[in-house]
């Protein structure tokens, strides 16, 4: 599924191109699935072109689960037949190449296609919970935007760290977020966040594109010495505040990805797939996301 120009979802084309050939250090992966992420919309529209310019025409898709079918020179870590997951451009296809050092062995206890949901959302949640917020046992953590792909992992990882998790979700996501382990759920469509908490929390993981006013409200909901970690808009602590504000872009870290795979296979982290759709539905998935009709993780199967 490719684009030749930036634009609305109609620029996405289903095209036949030659099967890619793995270069030195690369593996060729037969794609079991890729997964949709909100950033795919910005990439397609060209909104991210200053930071992440696409080499047009290009194949869409930012993460993959699949089976190695060929290895390039110098690759000793993977062999033909290995099932792998990772972040790589061009995964909205039947085959994609990836540097061997950017993929890890796929989990063995869930369908391979479902594992395509882990690399971006899972690693983002991992870095938010452990690296930037440093969540520890007994803390009170607010996951703002728990109904989304990152949120599902963030709730589970914060629980795994031993936190008491308060989550925001609308009615369509409440049951899922509860099943993933949230201790308390705030329906953000009914209750203003600031009114919903009776005492400050130790950390907020902000996964929502908040306005400047909403971001300032988040700051006021954390105890002195606490932290607000945002994966969306930049956040800023008021002058003299004892709250730490962090905004970050996820790093492709195979140690974090492998650690997630271990937790999935141990039954600690569930990979919640809201929908599995044919890859040829990609334009329709983009439209659904743009109209707010997509929730949780959608995987796309060639
Ligand atoms: N910094 C990075 O490197 C990085 C990496 C990955 C993602 N991101 C960004 O992080 C954000 C979340 O990603 P995602 O994959 O989880 O997106 P997603 O799956 O589309 O989830 C978005 C969810 O946000 C919830 N939501 C919307 N408005 C809300 C509000 N006002 N309050 C609380 N929840 C609200 C909705 O949940 P309900 O179903 O409950 O309504 C929706 O399902 C996106 O903006 C994405 O671009 C950044």
Image (cartoon, rainbow, N blue to C red):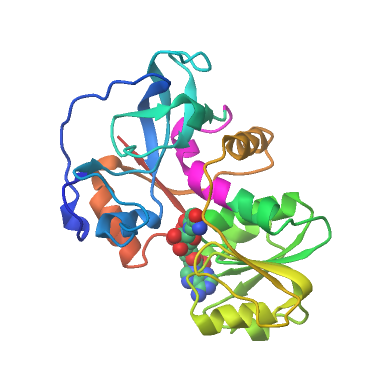
Quadrant including the C terminus = top left
Residue 287 percent across, percent down from the top left: 27, 60
Numbered-mark total: 0
**Image-based side of 44 in relation to 213, left or right:** left
Prevailing secondary structure of the magenta residues = helix
- Residue at 70 percent across and 79 percent down: it is 221
Residue 245 x/y as whole percent: 64, 69
Image quadrant in which you'd find residue 138: bottom right
Q: Would you say 283 lies left or right of 171 here?
A: left
Q: Is residue 296 magenta?
A: no
- What are the residue bounds of the magenta stretch? 108-124
Q: Is residue 112 magenta?
A: yes
| Image location of residue 212, percent across then percent down | 51, 81
Seen in the picture, residue 36 relative to 221 is either above or below; the reply is above
Q: Is residue 153 left or right of residue 166?
A: left
Screen quadrant of the N terminus? top left
Eyeballing the image, is 146 above or below 85? below
Q: Position of residue 233 (x, y in %)?
A: 50, 69
Can residue 48 be seen from the camera position used here? yes
């Amino acid at each position: 599924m490719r684009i030749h120009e930036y634009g609305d979802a109609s620029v996405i084309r289903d095209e036949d191109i030659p099967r890619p050939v793995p270069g030195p250090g690369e593996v060729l992966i037969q794609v079991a699935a890729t997964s949709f992420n909100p950033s795919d919309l910005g990439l397609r529209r060209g909104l991210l072109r200053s930071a992440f310019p696409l080499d047009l025409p290009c194949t869409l898709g930012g993460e993959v689960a699949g089976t190695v079918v060929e290895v390039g020179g110098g690759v000793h870590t993977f062999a033909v037949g290995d099932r792998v997951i990772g972040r790589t451009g061009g995964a909205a296809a039947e085959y994609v190449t990836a540097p061997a050092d950017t993929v890890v062995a796929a989990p063995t206890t869930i369908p391979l296609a479902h594992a395509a949901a882990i690399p971006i959302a899972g690693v983002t949640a991992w870095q938010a919970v452990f690296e930037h917020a440093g969540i520890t046992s007994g803390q009170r953590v607010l996951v703002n935007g728990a109904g989304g792909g990152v949120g599902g992992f963030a709730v589970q990882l914060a629980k795994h760290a031993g936190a008491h998790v308060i989550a925001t979700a609308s009615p369509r996501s409440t049951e899922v977020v509860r099943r993933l382990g949230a201790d308390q759920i705030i329906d953000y469509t009914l209750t203003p966040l600031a009114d919903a908490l009776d005492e400050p929390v130790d950390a907020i993981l902000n996964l929502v594109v908040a306005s400047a006013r909403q971001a300032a409200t988040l700051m006021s909901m954390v105890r002195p010495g606490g932290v607000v970690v945002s994966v969306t808009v930049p956040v800023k602590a008021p002058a003299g505040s004892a709250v730490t504000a962090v905004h970050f872009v996820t790093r492709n870290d195979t140690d974090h990805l492998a650690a997630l795979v271990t937790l999935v296979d141990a039954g600690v982290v569930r990979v919640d797939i809201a929908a599995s759709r044919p890859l040829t539905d990609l334009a329709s998935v983009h439209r659904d996301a743009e109209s707010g009709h997509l929730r949780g993780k959608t995987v796309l199967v060639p």
